Image (tube, helix red, strand yellow):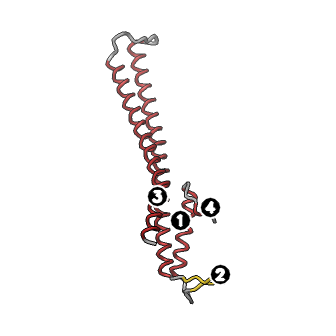
């Protein structure tokens, strides 16, 4: 049961979301014969609308955490796809430059002190590819940092504030 409150990854969050949703549906559609539950002599008064509201709130928060984890997975997929595209672009660029060098200089290519225009183009294109790849990785790193901040601090602050000001 304790593992259902763990939201450290997508799988555990999905499991907790299923449970919160199921409990909310069950409580909302149950017929309560009495508003009291007695356990070991202790009597608890349960109000069905309040239980449903609590279930809806926990489902909403769990859904929000689930979306954070899902988007994190999507950014990682995007970065992997972008890296493959950049590798293909770099490979194509290298092949083009190799072909140009072999046509112009033959097999014994040795760049002279002054760079040819296609060598400058190659360097600029390589820099553009590298910058685009770095940008994709940076977006993933920034999103991971924001996700960690929200999960570790912001949600705790929201829960504590709600419990303190609206018990």
N-terminal-most mark, 4 or 3 = 4
Q: What kind of element bears circle 1? A: helix
Q: What kind of element bears circle 2? A: strand
Give the mark toward the camera: 3 or 2.
2
Q: Point out residue 7 in the picture as x, y percentages from the top left corner.
A: 55, 58
Q: Are marks 1 and 3 in contact (CB under 8 Å)?
A: no
Q: Are marks 1 and 2 in contact (CB under 8 Å)?
A: no
Residue 39's disc number: 2
Question: Gap in Å between the C-alphas at discs 1 and 2?
Answer: 27 Å
Question: Gap in Å between the C-alphas at discs 4 and 3?
Answer: 19 Å
In this view of the protein, which residue sits in the foreground, 95 or 126? 126
Q: Residue furthest front?
A: 164
Q: Are marks 4 and 3 in contact (CB under 8 Å)?
A: no
Q: Residues within 10 Å of mark 3 (few under 14, many from 20)?
A: some
Q: Point out residue 93 in the picture as x, y percentages from the top left corner.
A: 41, 27
Query: Can you identify the residue that label 1 sits on?
Result: 17
N-terminal-most mark, 1 or 3 = 1
């Amino acid at each position: 049961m304790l593992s259902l409150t763990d939201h450290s990854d997508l799988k555990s969050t999905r499991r907790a979301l299923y449970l919160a949703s199921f409990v909310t549906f069950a409580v909302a559609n149950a017929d309560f014969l009495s508003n009291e539950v007695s356990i070991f002599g202790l009597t608890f008064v349960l109000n069905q609308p309040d239980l449903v509201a609590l279930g809806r709130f926990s489902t909403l928060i769990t859904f929000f955490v689930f979306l954070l984890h899902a988007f994190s997975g999507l950014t990682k997929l995007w970065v992997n796809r972008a890296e493959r595209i950049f590798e293909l672009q770099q490979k194509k660029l290298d092949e083009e430059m190799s072909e140009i060098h072999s046509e112009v200089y033959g097999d014994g290519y040795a760049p002279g002190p002054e760079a040819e225009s296609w060598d400058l183009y190659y360097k600029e294109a390589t820099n553009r590819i590298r910058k685009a790849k770095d940008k994709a990785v940076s977006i993933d790193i920034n999103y991971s940092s924001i996700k960690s901040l929200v999960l570790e601090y912001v949600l705790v602050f929201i829960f504590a504030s709600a419990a303190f000001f609206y018990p």
